[in-house]
Amino acid sequence: MIKENLNEIQNKIEYSLLKRTVTADSNSVKLIAVTKNHEVADMQEAIEAGVLSIGENRIQEAISKAATLDREVEWHLLGHLQTNKVKQAVHLFDMIHSVDSKKIAVEINKEAKKINKIQDVLLQVNIAKEESKFGIYAEDLPDLLRDVDQMESLHVCGLMTIAPICDNLEEVRPIFKNMFHLYTDMKQHKFEKTDLKWLSMGMSHDYTAAIEEGANMVRIGTAIFGPRQY
Ligand SMILES: *Cc1c(COP(=O)(O)O)cnc(C)c1O
């Protein structure tokens, strides 16, 4: 099933790219397979079917999976990061999608420096200003970008958002439009080393709309692996 699901998703990604009306700088989409609460065997199956990047939310779960998974993959941290977990996160993850404060950025920079790593990160934006969600507000983003650009062991390579849950994709589309607008706007700024090339938005239920509106990285779990067991 995993292989078939991936094929179907790939087709939908291609179709959404064709339907894209915005001018984005890349005409491809990077798929992050979100494996939280799924077994290592499922991850293995996905990797054999061509998955190159894995997304996880919790550090402990990711560490124990990494220890048993004997495959080369890119590890992406999607979940909120607490200060006391930063060291472990920096050791494992190729990219951290959930940086939303100067405080956490400072911690990541410190731990990355200790192990001579340049940590790739995305800044998480709470574009719809939902109280229940992490992420920085759009108006505070320029300041955070400026600060983080100065941190020598951090490399900001894009923005991430989690859209509100809507019954209808057309309701969430304006949110994706806003986010793409913010992203293209921020790309105009002059930075020393920040290179905004990824816009991570879109999950199982809304990735087609996200891609149509300019996403070039999507994070998909349920549509690949089925519902999660908690
Ligand atoms: C769980 C999760 C996903 C994947 O969600 P699905 O609906 O299963 O595709 C994507 N992004 C983040 C931040 C997540 O926590």
Image (tube, rainbow, N blue to C red):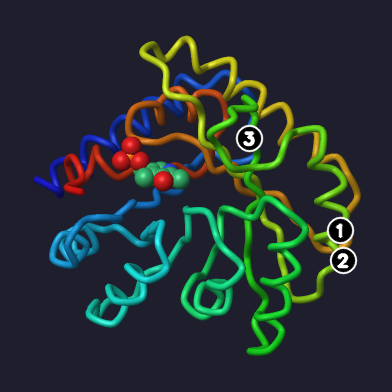
Specify whether residue 50 is in view. Answer: yes
Give, as a three-letter code, the residue at label 1.
Asp
Residue that badge 2 annotates: 150
Residue that badge 3 annotates: 126
Distance between mark 3 and mark 1 Cα atoms: 19 Å
Horizontally, is 72 left or right of 8 in the view?
Answer: right
Rendered position, 78 above or below 153? above
Sequence order check: which comes first, mark 3 or mark 1?
A: 3
- Residue at 30% x, 58% y is 51
Give, as a three-letter code, the residue at label 3.
Asn
Q: Secondary structure at mark 3?
A: loop
Quarter where residue 49 is shown? bottom left
The N terminus sits in image quarter: top left
Residue 85 at x, y = what percent? 53, 72
Residue that badge 1 annotates: 147
The nearer-to-camera label among 3 and 2 is 3
Residue 168 at x, y = what percent? 39, 11
Q: Is mark 2 within 8 Å of ligand 1?
A: no
Rendered position, 140 above or below 60? above
Specify whether residue 219 is in view. Answer: no
Few, some or many residues within 10 Å of mark 1 (<14, 14–19, 20+): some
- Residue at 46% x, 10% y is 170
- As drawn, the label of residue 31 is none
Quarter where residue 193 is shown? bottom right
Give, as a three-letter code, the residue at label 2.
Gln
Q: Secondary structure at mark 1?
A: helix
Residue 140 at x, y = what percent? 81, 39
- Seen from the viewer's position, the closer of residues 102 and 176 is 102
